[in-house]
């Protein structure tokens, strides 16, 4: 447990990552992701509780933990005025790799992370995506047994995000043990073997991505119709194609249907189109959407994730579902 | 690697990192020398005419005071940079590494000593241009410079504590200005302390900035042996007083900054 004043940043959080596997900690802003990573990487002492990394007690032997981990924090912690190479060389020296090994490793990682061309430019001239990659490289310098990545793609543009995912997939394939935090279900889905969903410093669900999706429902078919009159026809057309009954959002004339995942989404989509056409529904839009963090939260907690301080706009009686 | 060796090794790596910044951002040196150079010109050519220091050319009197003030300003970089590193997460990176954490502070303060050497070189040249001269032996002059830099080194550790305490570079700037202003002006840096009102005079005479200035003046031969030195013990024994002050300050502030570093970084 860790409290900041009245805020319980961590509240009985319990995590385990099997060696060689990847755990994604999924949660909204303020859920306690960074706090957990900081505790596990020896940067922060919890008020109570214990933690082990690579079999070593974090509170009792922080220095031994530090020899075995690599950390890439939420904000790239690279030195603006050094070049990419100098940054990695410095980190290597501070891991006590020795002068020659540190240099070789720095060059090697700049290659792996596609920063060769910028290697000898000050980091000040790097884009956000390049800084993140350099920060990741710094975490990899000593070939750590356990890697911690705090929101590795938050704030990146879509292209850099995909680039980062490719790099991370490579690492995962090599069998590094990774704990990564993210706000994106898609990211957790792509990279992790198992997922832990946290909110308010507590675990609210865990399992493999398939298990979670089975709970949350898989993909969602969304139809936007041209006219309010056509909403009922749409509902009856979609009924029975997925789990439960279709959900209607009146003011946007949107009808969504969570799919059960037993049939391929494309197949369901074709059938939905056929039925809607049969009812002569005029559609403005139809799409298959992957479930988002919002869907996960809606299903697991009955409320959409929201920042702590935001006033609760739902009427008394507790926080119930809010329209999206 | 054995403990002390590791501290030195890590300190060296960190110092190198900090000095690269001095090389990459030349503005830093310009900013640190520009205002003292302005002070030299202002006091030497504008106010100097109306300040009378018995038995000594005012410009020779002035330069040691400027040196002392400049060294203090140079030492503030320690706190400023630590606050910046905290803010940018660089300290988090260091703390996640299996390195000596004292190495971060040792590397920082050592780099700032190197920087201050650079600054005092620029200021010496400026002094020579306006008519300052060293009138003693090489060794005495060397002792004067060493004393000034040692003094700055001690101040660096004070600044480290302040920087780690306030954590925000802008706040640090303001906090330090309030500290430094009285220290460098209520002293014998620009005018002899004898003419100050009683309370201020007592402050000035026991102010370590006065002692280091007096010591430097004597070691550079910028005093008139026929003129009596104020009665106060620190000014009668300026070298000893400065050295004592340096030792006590280091003994207090080195452990304090290591403790504050742990606390600041673990938030
Ligand atoms: N240094 C701090 N001081 C006060 N409150 C903090 C501090 N760090 C985090 N918190 C609070 O703890 C909670 C968890 O924060 P954090 O772990 O950063 O969440 P996340 O990384 O999931 O966005 C939030 O409510 C946040 O406001
Ligand atoms: Mg965070």
Image (cartoon, rainbow, N blue to C red):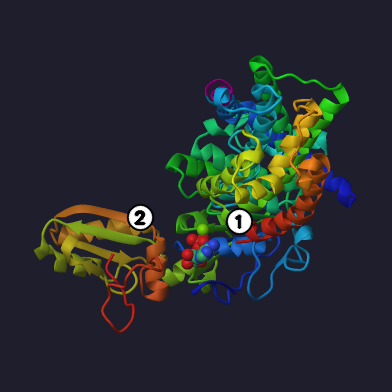
Q: Is residue A208 above or below residue B138?
A: below
Say which quadrant the N terminus of chain A sits in.
bottom right
Can residue B158 be seen from the camera position used here? yes
Say which quadrant the C terminus of chain A sits in.
bottom left
Q: Quadrant of residue A177?
A: bottom right
The residue positioned 66% from the left and 76% from the top of the image is: A49
Is residue A36 a member of the stretch shown in magenta? no
SS assignment for the magenta stretch, majority: helix
Front position in the image: A288 or A157: A157
Q: Which mark is residue A266?
A: 2
Real-space CA distance between mark 1 and mark 2, rounded to the nearest whole angstrom? 59 Å
Disc 2: host chain:
A
Sort mark 1 into few (<14), some (14-19) or many (20+) by Cα contacts within 10 Å: some
Q: Quadrant of residue A232?
A: bottom left
Residue extending farthest bottom: A317
Q: Which mark is residue B175?
A: none
The percent coordinates of residue B200 (x first, y second) are: 61, 48
Magenta stretch?
A: B41-46
Can residue A104 be seen from the camera position used here? no
Sort mark 2 into few (<14), some (14-19) or many (20+) by Cα contacts within 10 Å: few
Disc 1: host chain:
B
Is residue B42 a member of the stretch shown in magenta? yes
Query: Which residue was labeled with disc 1?
Result: B165
Mark 1 against mark 2, which lies toward the viewer? 1
The residue positioned 58% from the left and 57% from the top of the image is: A180
The percent coordinates of residue A207 (x first, y second) are: 55, 69
């Amino acid at each position: 447990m860790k409290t900041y004043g009245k805020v319980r940043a961590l509240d009985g959080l319990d995590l385990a990552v099997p060696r060689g596997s990847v755990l994604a900690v999924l949660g909204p802003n303020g859920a306690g992701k960074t706090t957990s990573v900081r505790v596990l990487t020896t940067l922060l002492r919890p008020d109570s509780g214990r933690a082990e990394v690579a079999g070593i007690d974090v509170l009792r032997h922080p220095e031994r933990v530090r020899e075995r981990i690599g950390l890439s924090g939420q904000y790239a912690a690279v030195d603006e005025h050094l070049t990419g190479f100098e940054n990695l060389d410095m980190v290597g020296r501070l891991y006590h790799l020795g002068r020659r090994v540190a240099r070789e490793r720095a060059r090697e990682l700049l290659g792996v992370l596609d920063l060769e061309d910028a290697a000898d430019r000050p980091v000040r001239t790097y884009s956000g995506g390049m800084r993140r990659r350099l920060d990741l490289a710094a975490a990899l310098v000593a070939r750590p047994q356990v890697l911690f990545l705090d929101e590795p793609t938050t704030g990146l543009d879509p292209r850099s995000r995909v680039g980062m995912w490719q790099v991370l997939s490579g690492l995962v394939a090599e069998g590094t043990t990774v704990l990564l935090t993210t706000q994106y279900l898609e990211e957790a889905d792509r990279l992790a073997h198992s997922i832990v969903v946290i909110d308010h410093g507590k675990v609210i669900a865990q399992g493999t991505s398939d298990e979670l999706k089975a709970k949350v429902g898989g993909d969602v078919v969304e139809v936007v119709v041209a006219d309010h009159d056509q909403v009922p026809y749409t509902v009856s057309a979609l009924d029975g194609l997925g789990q439960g009954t279709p959900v209607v959002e009146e003011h946007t004339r949107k009808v969504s249907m969570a799919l059960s995942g037993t049939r391929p989404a494309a197949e369901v989509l074709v059938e939905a189109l056929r039925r809607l056409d049969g009812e002569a529904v005029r559609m403005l839009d139809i799409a298959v959407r992957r479930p988002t963090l919002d869907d996960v939260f809606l299903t697991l907690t009955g409320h959409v994730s929201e920042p702590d301080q935001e006033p609760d706009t739902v009427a008394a009686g507790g926080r119930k579902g809010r329209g999206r | 690697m054995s403990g002390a060796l590791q501290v030195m090794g890590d300190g060296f790596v960190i110092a190198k990192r900090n000095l690269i910044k001095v090389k990459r951002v030349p503005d830093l040196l310009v900013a640190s020398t520009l205002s003292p150079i302005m002070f030299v010109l202002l006091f030497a050519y504008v106010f100097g005419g109306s300040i009378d220091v018995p038995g000594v050319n005012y410009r020779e009197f002035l330069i040691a005071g400027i040196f002392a003030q400049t060294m203090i300003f140079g030492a503030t970089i320690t706190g400023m940079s630590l606050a910046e590193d905290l803010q940018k997460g660089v300290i988090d990176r260091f703390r996640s590494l299996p390195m000596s954490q004292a190495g971060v502070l040792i590397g920082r303060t050592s780099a700032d000593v190197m920087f201050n050497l650079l600054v005092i070189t620029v200021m010496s040249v400026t002094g020579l241009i306006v008519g300052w001269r060293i009138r003693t032996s090489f060794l005495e002059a060397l002792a004067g410079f060493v004393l000034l830099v040692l003094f700055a080194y001690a101040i660096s550790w004070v600044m480290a504590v302040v920087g780690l305490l306030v954590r925000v570079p802008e706040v640090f700037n303001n906090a330090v200005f309030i500290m430094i202003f009285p220290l460098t002006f209520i002293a014998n840096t620009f005018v002899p302390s004898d003419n100050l009102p009683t309370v201020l005079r007592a402050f000035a005479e026991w102010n370590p900035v006065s002692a280091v200035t007096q010591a430097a003046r004597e070691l550079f031969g910028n005093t008139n042996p026929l003129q009596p030195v104020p009665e106060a013990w620190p000014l009668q024994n300026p070298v000893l007083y400065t050295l004592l002050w340096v030792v006590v300050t280091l003994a207090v502030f080195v452990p304090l900054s290591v403790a504050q570093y742990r606390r600041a970084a673990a938030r």
